[in-house]
Amino acid sequence: MLKSLYAQILLWLLVPLLVIVALDAIATYRSAQNTARLVQERQLLGSARTIAEQVSYEEGRLTVSVPPAALELFDAGYGDYVHYRVTTASGELITGRSDVPLPTQQIEPEHWVAFDAQVNGEATYAVAFAQPVFAPGSPGPVLVVVAQTLRERSVLAQNLWLRGMRDQILLIALGTILIWAGVQRGIAPLRALRTKMQQRAPAALEPLTLDRVPAELKPMVEAMNDYIAQLGEQMQAHNRFIADASHQLRTPLAVMNMQVDVAVREVDGSSRAEALAAIKSSLRSNIRVVNQLLSYTEAEGLHARVRSSEPVDLAEVVRDVVVESVTQAQAKDIDLGVELLCDTVPVYVAAHALHVLVANLVDNAVRYTQAGGKVTVRLGLGIAGSVLEVIDNGPGIAPDQRERAFERFTRLHGKEIDGCGLGLAIVKEIADAGGANVMLDTPAEGRGLIVRIAFA
Ligand SMILES: Nc1ncnc2c1ncn2[C@@H]1O[C@H](COP(=O)(O)OP(=O)(O)OP(=O)(O)O)[C@@H](O)[C@H]1O
Ligand SMILES: [Mg+2]
């Protein structure tokens, strides 16, 4: 397959053109042969008639004297041989060569025929003319046959053919130049578009203008503009994320910097230990912010890879997460439990992504539920597929806040509890990519929160 559109257009125009030229060469050859044959036929007939005019009836005999003019006609310098034969109606030779063949059919007086014949072992073309003779006893017409070898005729045919072909080749050459120029002109808008694209600044996001774009290219340019618009939105979202993320990182780092200053200046041992404890706490929350930011960018960029073709057992992931969270739960005296409503819970989401999802939900539940509360992770099979529920009896999220809770960097419960507001956004990204549905609900007891993830 040819890569260049230009080459393809030229190929599709020129190959058929060449086929036409080839066919035309054959047709021209035939017509040149025909013309040359007709010319020879006219000459032979003229010569036969001239000879026939000389037939006379003298002293009871038919005689003919062949005038030199009758044969001079043929002397064109190609070395052709001319033979003739004049016979009576009964086949008696009057003059000429007896080996010149006679026509196979009968010829009416004053009529003629042309035919191919061999004389002296060489191919010739012959014309036979029947000359009526008015004489006593009516001897019937005299037959004059004139035959000529084919040299001049083939030279003539060849010349005619070559001349015809030369004109045609000139025409084709001219046509090719015009086609080439036409195609160049035709694809000029494409080149212009390319130049326009090349001249754009790398991050330019303004749409391409549609004026002076040919109708055929409009859909393509429109599609490109749609794409540019989408890219613009994505870039804006990305920039917003980076601005938010840097804010999230800068503030706690500045705080830590101050804390370190204080610790360095502190001379008293116990105050110093206090300052160090504060630094450690800040460091922990900084680590959390960094981890959440990384999880989010990963979840956002992973879309294609979140789905798994092999089933992953959700129950196993949940058990791992619960084991990791036991210490955190115990520190708040929270009763953290798992309710398995079936043996295995197959889910088609990559294990790593699942782990991040479950860990964020359990972390939220343990974090926002008051000390002495209860957190349950329930696993079961719904109508469409596996269902994961993380249930707590904490403060819950008011129904009108639930949509907002999934937005990045949104925090609903004040600053006393550490966090950067990315957890639920991460959960949503992973669920969307894994084809799962996320819902927030209030437990039957009327207090707390259920986060329900229905996997497809
Ligand atoms: N189980 C829950 N009970 C009550 N409120 C919750 C619960 N889970 C989340 N929330 C509320 O939703 C908000 C957003 O939660 P999200 O997990 O996205 O962020 P975060 O926990 O504040 O920060 P992090 O990114 O560190 O997890 C939280 O700040 C909290 O106010
Ligand atoms: Mg959270």
Image: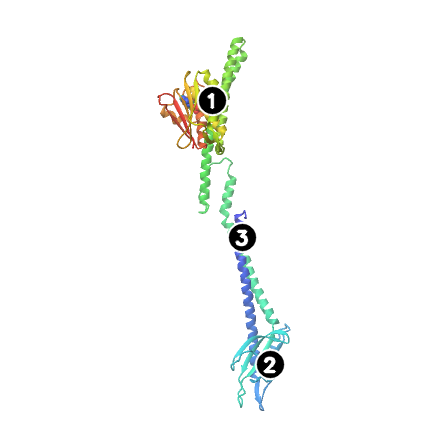
- Choose between 39 and 110: the one closer to the eye: 110
Name which residue type carries label 3.
Answer: Leu
The image shows residue 34 at horizontal and vertical percentages of: 55, 69
Q: Earlier in the sequence, mark 1 or mark 2?
A: 2
Residue corresponding to mark 3 = 11
User: Can you identify the residue that label 1 sits on?
Assistant: 322
Q: Quadrant of residue 264?
A: top right
Check disc 2 and give the amino acid type: Arg
Query: Residue 148 vs residue 343: left or right?
Result: right
Contact (Cβ within 8 Å) of mark 2 with mark 3: no
Mark 2: secondary structure: strand
- Image x and y of residue 77, in percent: 63, 73
Q: Residue at x 61, y 71 (%)?
A: 152
**Left or right: 122 in relation to 11:** right
Report the side of 30 relative to 241 (left or right). Answer: right
Mark 1 or 3: the one toward you: 1
Q: Position of residue 9 (x, y in %)?
A: 52, 51
Tag in front: 2 or 3: 2
Residue located farthest toward the front when viewing the structure as drawn: 343
Q: Quadrant of ligand 1?
A: top left
Reply above or below: 101 against 216.
below
Q: What kind of element bears circle 3? A: helix
Mark 1 residue crowding within 10 angstroms, few (<14) / some (14–19) / many (20+): many
